[in-house]
Image (cartoon, helix red, strand yellow):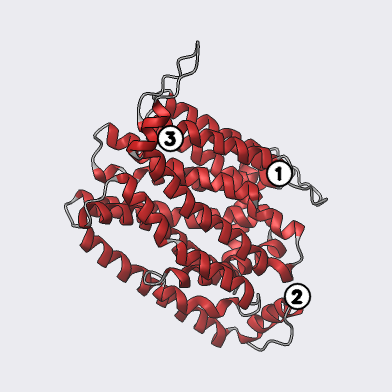
Amino acid sequence: MAAQFFSSLADNALLVAAIALLMQADAPSWLTPYLKFFFVISYVLLAPYVGAFADRLPKGQVMFLANGVKICGCVLMLWGVDPLAAYAVVGLGAAAYSPAKYGILTEYLPHRQLVLANGWIEGLTVASIILGTMLGGVLLHTKVSGVLLHLDFPLFDTGIDTPAEAAIAIIVVVYAVAALFNLEVPRTGVTLKHLPANPLQTLGDFARCVSHLWKDRLGQISLAVTTLFWGAGATLQFIVIEWARSALNFDLSKAAILQGVTAVGIAIGAVLASAWISLERSVRVIPLGIAMVLIGALAGFFVVPMNALLQHRGHHLVGAGRSIAVQNFNENTSVLLMIALYSALLNVGHSIYMVILVFGLFVASTMGLVQLWFSHNRRAHAGELDRLLAFARAEDPHPRRKG
């Protein structure tokens, strides 16, 4: 949990610093969302391979190597490489990190504890989003960056001359702290799987995993929900910043801090879900997704059971690392599409207020369709769903709870 917290903390602080680099270069506002686009492209392109890689080595070792790649991306930014390209390298590390950080849960814990474990992981992840975004804003603040830029090292010229570069230098240290924690991640004793010798064979295996999860009556619902949720969340990061600049005349530092504050409700919802929602009843939170754009607490309460359900089904169908890679592939394809749509709306001249309206209606209506999809499954495949939910009930820590 400590390793995940510090790595995610650095990821979110780095996004703010990378935005500052683009603003420093006078890049147009519609280009800013493409930082996220370049960050998540690795999740989509490498999804067939990072899941298999995560199952090939101990999860702690995978996370350590992935944090090393993230540090390399930061160094490229400091060397003056285009922020979009350098941030893509950081995304490569993040793509390799994700299957390991979630896959270890199903290896380390019994399924009856998955909702609780996801509550802790998501709670810490959201806390890191809050604090990481705020950290990025604080590091860019005039007073803080002024102190950092006046630090001198005898006989050594750092070449760090701007607030954004000073912030990135501090973020490298945070990644290094996360890497140290990665070294202490326990080995679970799960049998490691060999990578297929032929890359095309790996691609075919991944396609099989995608098919298995989308055909599963519970897996397809949780995949649809989490895909929409994280695509919406990634886009909201930029919407909040742009809205704060347009409506409140905030600079990037203040807008980043505001963005962190809006995520507090998600952390509260994640903690409540871990305490109140059993794996068996996880599908019953789907209607909350319709309103998730309105109340942050519902978002946290909504996503934790969905993640636990997907991990539960994925572990049994295709394996821990591969199931997370499939989830990442779908979620980040959604991120790419939503970010591209958001950027296009800004590029053609629509105001941020129109973008918010279109975005909110799209998320709410799409989540409503997912609810109808699940209701159809309940009617048309009642026997199959009952068997799947009975399996979850057998591993439920609250077997007497009715749902």
Mark 2 vs mark 3: give the one in front: 3
The image quarter in which residue 337 lies? bottom left
Q: Position of residue 268 (x, y in %)?
A: 52, 68
At horizontal 72% and vertical 60% (from top left) the residue drawn is 106
Q: Compared with residue 230, is residue 157 higher up or lower down, i.e. above or below?
A: above
At horizontal 70% and vertical 58% (from top left) the residue drawn is 105
Mark 1 vs mark 2: give the one in front: 1
At horizontal 36% and vertical 24% (from top left) the residue drawn is 161
C-alpha distance separating marks 1 and 2: 27 Å
Q: Position of residue 361 (x, y in %)?
A: 30, 71
Left or right relative to 258: residue 46:
right
Q: Position of residue 378 (x, y in %)?
A: 56, 85
Tag of residue 60: 1
Q: Secondary structure at mark 1?
A: helix
> Which of disc 3 and disc 1 is earlier in sequence?
1
Outermost residue toward the top in this view = 155
Mark 1 vs mark 3: give the one in front: 3
Label 3, on which residue?
Answer: 167
Q: Can residue 208 be seen in the rendering of this structure? A: no
> Which of disc 2 and disc 1 is earlier in sequence?
1
